[in-house]
Amino acid sequence: MASKRFHILEIPSQDSSAALQQDVREGLFELPRSLPAKYFYDDQGSKLFDAICKTQDYYPTRTELSLLQKHVAEIIDAVKPNTCTELGAGTSAKTEIILAKLNSSLDAFTYLSIDVCEEVLIESAHRLLNKFANLRIESVIGEYIPAIQAAPKLASPALYAFIGSSIGNFTEQESIELLSEVANKMTAEDYFLIGMDRVKDKQILERAYDDSEGVTAKFNLNVLNVLNYKLGANFDLSKFLHQAIYNEKQQQIEMYLISQCDQEINFPMFDKTIKLEKGEKILTEISRKYTKSSIEYLLEKSGLKEAMHFEPSNEYFSLVLAKRQQ
Ligand code: AVI
């Protein structure tokens, strides 16, 4: 029975509403104003993100997918994994390519999926267990670092995966902390597959984050709905504009919401009103872009070293297979 092959572990975390209140106090009530990108992903935000991935302008998803399809055999050949652990597993859509390959070559293997969203993990676990008879799934629900620490250590050789270029949404310091946490868990036999978006033409980058269908704009504005719903704030979405700019010095896309007029926003829960001036910006996301040398630097600082590197001929994206430093 599929359920015998599925176990789930929930990491007790800080009360999510207390965490949101603290993030709003520290980010939105202070200058320069910002919000953590994780608040994009309510139901509507997750649907909008899926829609972004299908737009013509947002190239990372399809580029990484075709890299994975092209090189999965080489990756499995190099690692010979018995297990696969994925950070930010979500629907596991891309990881399915790896799992299909393992299912055809192993009598039994384990997939450990880590994500904050329980419903998505359960839904995708059922789909995968029905498809792959030799698969067992362990799911850990929680924020990345506590989840990695609490996750069971699976048999080596293990393949760890952090794909989707999600590493780019963390600051350099946060990325090093996160990758180091995985490196500490790895044995000398294990490998870590990381998807990273590359530095490229400014126009291509800015279009990817301000697509011509307007989906990314809706995704960005939706975070204000999340604050209205969860905090009883009174943001009027029609009074904000989406902006995505590529900061060449920092090598990152920065997404902002720009106030279109002088306005006051009430937060009854805090008994607080903030005044936004016309043109004032709220930073809602960074998405860092990498060069071969910044990838090497990040791995080095995180206790990892490159073993294999896959990229398309236009060098738009990197799938890096890393080992632990000895
Ligand atoms: C989830 N993450 C990797 C996306 C990115 O490209 O940074 C989030 C995103 N934001 C706007 N478009 C996509």
Image (tube, rainbow, N blue to C red):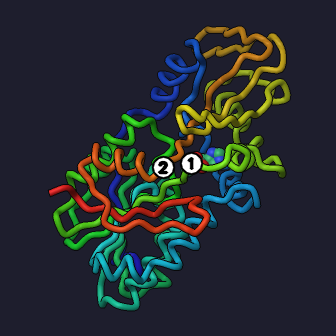
Judge from the rendering whether residue 270 lies leftward or rightward of residue 244; answer left or right. left
Q: Secondary structure at mark 1?
A: loop
Three-letter code, disc 2: Thr
Three-letter code, disc 1: Val
Residue 1 in sight here: no
Residue 313: x %, y % from top left: 58, 69
Residue 153: x %, y % from top left: 21, 62
Relative height, residue 212 to residue 91 (above, below):
above
**Disc 1, ligand 1: is the CB inside 8 Å?**
no
Quarter the C terminus occupies: bottom left
Q: Which residue is mark 1?
A: 199
Rendering quarter of residue 189: bottom left
Rendering quarter of residue 135: bottom left
- Residue extending farthest to the left is 326
Quarter the N terminus occupies: bottom left
Residue 188: x %, y % from top left: 16, 65
* Residue nearest the observer in this picture, 190 or 28: 190
Q: Which residue is mark 2?
A: 291
Residue under the image location 40 percent in, 62 percent down = 320
Relative height, residue 147 to residue 69 (above, below):
above
Judge from the rendering whether residue 227 lies leftward or rightward of residue 79; answer left or right. right
Label located before the other in sequence (2 or 1): 1
Judge from the rendering whether residue 52 lies leftward or rightward of residue 278; answer left or right. left
Relative height, residue 75 to residue 214 (above, below):
below
Disc 1: CA contacts within 10 A as few (<14), some (14-19) or many (>=20): some
Judge from the rendering whether residue 307 lies leftward or rightward of residue 155; answer left or right. right
**Disc 2, ligand 1: is the CB inside 8 Å?**
no
Q: Secondary structure at mark 2?
A: loop
Disc 2: CA contacts within 10 A as few (<14), some (14-19) or many (>=20): some
Q: Are marks 2 and 1 in contact (CB under 8 Å)?
A: yes
Residue under the image location 46 percent in, 26 percent down = 18
Residue under the image location 63 percent in, 51 percent down = 46
